[in-house]
Image (cartoon, coloured by chain):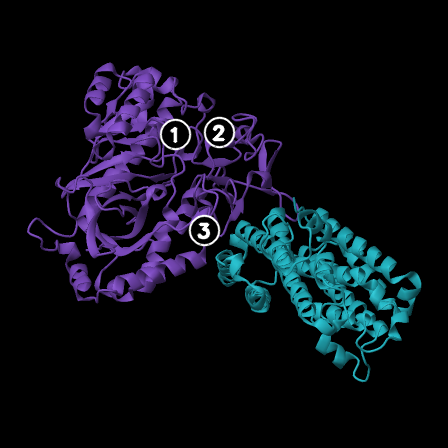
Amino acid sequence: MSDERTYFNEMLDEAGAPRQCYSRLAKWLEDKPANFLSRKSKDAETIFRRLGITFAVYGADEATERLIPFDPIPRIISAAEWRRLSAGIDQRVRALNAFLHDIYHRQEILRAGRIPADLILQNEAFLPEMAGFTPARKVYSHIIGTDLVRVSENEFYVLEDNTRTPSGVSYMMENRETMMRLFPELFQTHHVANVEQYPENLLQTLESVAPDPSKSSQTIVVLTPGIYNSAYFEHAFLADSMGVELVEGRDLFVDAGHVYMRTTREPQQVDVIYRRIDDAFLDPLTFNPDSMLGVPGLFDAYRAGNVTICNAPGTGIADDKAIYAYVPDIIEFYTGQKPILNNVPTWNCSRPDDLAYVLDNLEDIVVKEVHGSGGYGMLIGPTASKREIVEFRKVLETNPTNYIAQPTLALSACPTHVASGVAPRHVDLRPFVLIGDQVRITPGGLTRVALKKGSLVVNSSQGGGTKDTWVLED
Amino acid sequence: MLGRTASSLFWMSRYYERAQNLARLLEVAYRGAIMSHSGQEHGSHWTFALASAGCESDYNEKYDELHIRHVTAYMIFSKDNPTSIRSCLELARNNARAVRTGITAELWEAINTTWIEFSETNPQSITQDKLPDFLAWVNQRAHLFRGALLNTILRDDGYFFSQMGNFVERADNTARILDTQYWALLPDNDIVDDGSAERYQWSAILRALSGRRSYRFAYPNSRLKAFNIAEFLILRTEMPRSLAHCYDWIAETAEDLAQFYGSREPSLDLAAALFRELSDKQMHEIYRQGLHEFLTDFIGKNNQFAHQLSEDYNFS
């Protein structure tokens, strides 16, 4: 859809001239021979495949490990744009953590009537087991990946907050490494902010929320579901670059309220767990009794204050799609300020008025499952066939509370390498934020790009690719 | 180090060693099969490979006849055969993936590239004439794996566990090859004519263990003799695939491990005892005990050592 609609072109202005932050890149692109980018793309693919930077696709029998297509043209964000973005992200992640602390304690925001109590208390993502417990430094969500889309020169919308276990940061790092190998000359002409400090910042963040920060050395681990998980590469990458153990549930056990890992010698006590498994699989005694992934007794050890789990269990309530519409209220409530970054206007299909509007406008809007992710279970009205719309209408009418809807956004587009050369393709942006003793936002992030002409779906499971994201320094 | 990490490093090396052994076995069988004058009955070359790899009965359940196409499909490419080259390379890579944080980039690249290239190979394209090159490729990739390992990884506990995996598997492989052919290695066979079935068999055994040339150096003035071949492959520590050589390494590595961790475990005693037994023995004593009995006993003890190692260091 929407190639006829107006969208924001990040490289070129209305007159077709390069914007200032893209001027050198535009010139560089112009000077290169026709097959230059194709050749570089091939080089990049070889690098990625050899390093095993792959993701697994669920439900695919053959070739269960695939590469995410990498686009060799960087996406550029100016220093001024980044300052505003990072201020908005900072404000948002602080407010969401304050919100999490509040709803697991006094629930002032519910008492004030700013959010309907049912929406929280009846929500599957709300964990009553967390009530009354205060994690170290009152931080719940230590690692956040805020999904943003750009709709105009000065307007970014927050699409999702991803406060549970956001992934993609390894692509941010590896994309940069690859770009530095492919195009060293571009880094000499652009002052690109570094992203390589991310693992060190992550380690600092995790250490800062250890149960006993005075201990001289903290044992930190990354907890993965194992090699078949779609983000396994990233789990290994993070453990490796932080220099900590990558553990599975079966490597950990709880004894007398403390968590230990099984080593070749005596068990070693664990202080902080950066977990990349869902709440439901953390501890079969507290949550899902069928889980093979978790560690029996982990949650009790956590509540006893003997180990820190990052992100905390129960943070999913902060990025629940049904709560999303209230995030501007949440920001105002806890910070007393207006939100710097806007939400996408959202219709909550559990409200009859909203549902009626959504049903009347299905062909113009995007409908999403409240608990879905990865681009599954959604309807993109403008690109859907008549039949898809008819079928989705039935589903929506049967179970409206399961859905929210948003207008189709005119996602901004960036120059992208395609079969015919270079053409604009729609992108989003996921910067990565760390919250511990301070808030650290890595200048850059993961840019996902919809490689198909006109497509607005950037998910890697649906044919999206990634780009290196350059934040320029003044 | 996590117990699971130790286990993965151990198995990563074991599977690579196994893949290489399989490639060599198939090479020998292929060679025998194309040599019409070897005096062997049709198909027996493939039986040698299947039996030495321990998958003869599974093969016979699946296929009615011994045919090169079936044997290569089963021993190289089969997903159902847990000891096909494919399975070994895949399991080695899975174990390596599980310890990505514990191995070097060079080692990972060697393992990963091998797997990618192997899985991109169309089994149909490996016709009879392409088989030797393909097996040589597997062999070379295994050498690359060993080289990358030996040249890049830290000499710490991870190195010790991967060395253990390598030599436990190699010892097992050598003992099995000898045991499937033990009848050809009985000293009575030393009075046979050139060109006999036994003579062919000796040559095959030596080739399968990369020892045909080095035998000449170890026994400079001797023709192929059952007694010498058995001694070479069992007792001579300078032969890198002999049982004695493997246990020389294992006993030394067990000692390194004890020093590294500052405590002695039962597996160390097993390794030391087995190495002592091999160093003290003479070939004629082994013949007196019975070659087959000796080899069966050795295979059992080697397994027992591997099991004790996994107990001592919490492989889970």
> Residue B109's spot in the image, x, y percent?
49, 61
Q: At which x and y percent is residue A237?
A: 45, 51
Q: Residues within 10 Å of mark 1 (few under 14, many from 20)?
A: many
Q: In purple, which chain?
A: A
Q: Position of residue A373 (x, y in %)?
A: 36, 34
Can you tell which mark lies on residue A237? 3
Q: Earlier in the sequence, mark 1 or mark 2?
A: 2
Q: Which residue is mark 2?
A: A280
Chain of the residue under label 2: A
Q: CA distance from mark 1 to mark 2?
A: 11 Å
Task: Judge if badges 3 and 1 mark residues of a common chain.
Answer: yes
Q: Which mark is residue A316?
A: 1
Question: First in sequence: mark 2 or mark 3?
Answer: 3
Quarter of the view holding residue B70: bottom right
Tell me the kind of residue under disc 2.
Ala
Between residue A225 and residue A16, name the one nearer to us.
A16
Disc 3 secondary structure class: helix
